[in-house]
Image (cartoon, helix red, strand yellow):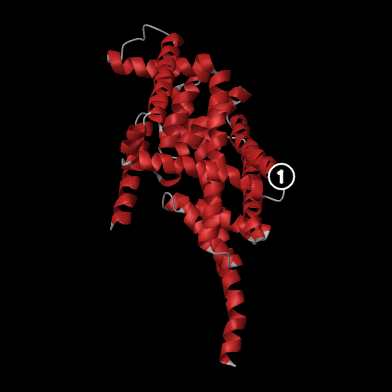
């Protein structure tokens, strides 16, 4: 019952965001622009997306080697694809589906493979945080003014901001300073630490941070940590290129530069973490809004977001369906000899 309620809420959230994003968009005009797109770039984007998932499967296999398992690259890739397919159907089901698929193909216990998925997700979060920091440094003027406008418009009721990026910098500095002071006070007071650790939210935060640390330390057990870091870098380079090459599909976005691609990668990754099917709605809202900073109209930004998200979603649904068929065929062929022996 609880799972069904979460699914309904997720669908409702996705539907609400989609309505909000597209309520002022002429869908017929958008479809015409899609029809005029250069599909060669879309084909290249799909190839790059497959490369990203194969690399992710390769990295996943490295994490399982210290546990005594060495899954085949094909089976690992199929498992990864089924996981992404599941995420487009039910949010947060991708990891469980991926591990369940690998068990059916390689008989690797789900609890062990799931632990490695958590470890690799930790590294992805760290990379994403690093990219957010890099993006903010390289595009400070654009991004700070963007968030300052949002912050001040909320306070002034939609009026024009009176100050620029300096206000955002001051607020950020004050928050950072307050955080340092709070950490010092907590570390110096054992009684305060004990009280805080009784709070369920604090316990979850501490547990998450401990998990991140354990995930980082797990790399020491790998046979070749260098290949692990190389594969991690390759995954994110592929992710960057998957979206960047789609700039050239539409004339309105063909002049966007590489920094715009970095912003798209970061903001899009944040949007994909929303509790909706495949980040639907949240991705469109965030990407459509932030692309205005690079000279696009809100309409063009939403068109770009829809184009990128739509092509990736359709491609993953198709290839994910083939991955599920592969699993069914593999299980059928492996079960038949067992049935024959049993009958004899």
State the residue in front, 227 or 156. Answer: 227
* Picture layout, residue 62 above or below residue 200: below
Instruction: Judge the density around disc 1: few (<14), some (14-19), many (≥20) Cα neighbours within 10 Å.
Output: some
Instruction: Identify the image quadrant of residue 201.
Output: top left
Residue at the limit of the structure toward the bottom, as seen here: 344
Q: Residue at x 36, y 38 (%)?
A: 202
Residue 226 visible? The answer is: yes
Which quadrant of the structure image shows residue 24?
A: top left
Indicate the position of residue 177 as horizontal and vertical percent values. Answer: 42, 18
Query: Looking at the image, which residue is at 38% across and 32% down?
Result: 21
Task: From the viewer's perspective, tell me whether residue 230 is left or right of residue 92.
Answer: right
Residue for point 53% across, 21% down: 136
Residue under numbered circle 1? 227
Foreground residue among 257 and 169 = 169
Judging from the image, what secondary structure is the residue with disc 1 in?
helix
Q: Between residues 237 and 248, which one lies in front from this camera angle?
A: 237
In the shown orientation, is residue 140 left or right of residue 46? left
Residue 100 visible in the displayed image: no
* Residue 212 at x, y percent in the picture: 51, 42
Position of 237 relative to 160 (above/below): below
**Residue drawn at (47%, 35%) of the image:** 270
On-image quarter of the C terminus: bottom right
């Amino acid at each position: 019952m609880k799972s069904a309620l979460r699914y309904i809420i997720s669908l409702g959230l996705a539907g609400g965001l989609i309505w909000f994003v597209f309520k002022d968009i002429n869908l017929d005009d958008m479809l015409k622009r899609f029809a005029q797109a250069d599909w060669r770039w879309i084909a290249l984007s799909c190839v790059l997306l497959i490369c990203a998932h194969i690399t992710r499967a390769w990295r996943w296999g490295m994490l399982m080697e210290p546990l005594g398992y060495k899954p085949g690259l094909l089976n690992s890739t199929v498992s990864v694809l089924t996981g992404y397919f599941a995420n487009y159907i039910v949010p947060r089901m991708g990891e469980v589906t991926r591990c369940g698929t690998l068990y059916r193909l390689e008989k690797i216990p789900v609890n062990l493979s799931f632990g490695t998925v958590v470890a690799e997700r930790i590294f992805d979060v760290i990379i994403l945080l690093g990219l957010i920091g890099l993006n903010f440094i390289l595009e400070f003027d654009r991004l700070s003014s963007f968030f300052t406008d949002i912050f001040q418009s909320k306070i002034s009721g939609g009026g024009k901001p009176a100050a620029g990026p300096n206000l955002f910098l001051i607020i950020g500095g004050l928050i950072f300073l307050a955080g340092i002071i709070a950490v010092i006070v907590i570390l110096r007071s054992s009684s305060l630490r004990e009280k805080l650790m009784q709070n369920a939210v604090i316990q979850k935060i501490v547990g998450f941070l401990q998990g991140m640390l354990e995930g980082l330390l797990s790399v020491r057990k790998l046979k070749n940590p260098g290949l692990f870091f190389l594969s991690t870098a390759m995954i994110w380079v592929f992710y960057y290129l998957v979206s960047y090459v789609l700039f050239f599909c539409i004339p309105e976005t063909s002049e966007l530069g590489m920094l715009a691609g970095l912003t798209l990668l970061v903001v899009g990754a944040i949007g994909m973490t929303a509790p909706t099917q495949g980040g639907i709605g949240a991705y469109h809202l965030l990407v459509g809004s932030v692309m205005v900073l690079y000279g696009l109209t809100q309409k063009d930004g939403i068109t770009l977001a829809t184009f990128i998200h739509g092509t990736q979603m359709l491609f993953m649904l198709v290839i994910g369906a083939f991955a599920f068929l592969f699993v069914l065929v593999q299980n059928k062929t492996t079960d038949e000899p067992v049935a024959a022996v049993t009958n004899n």
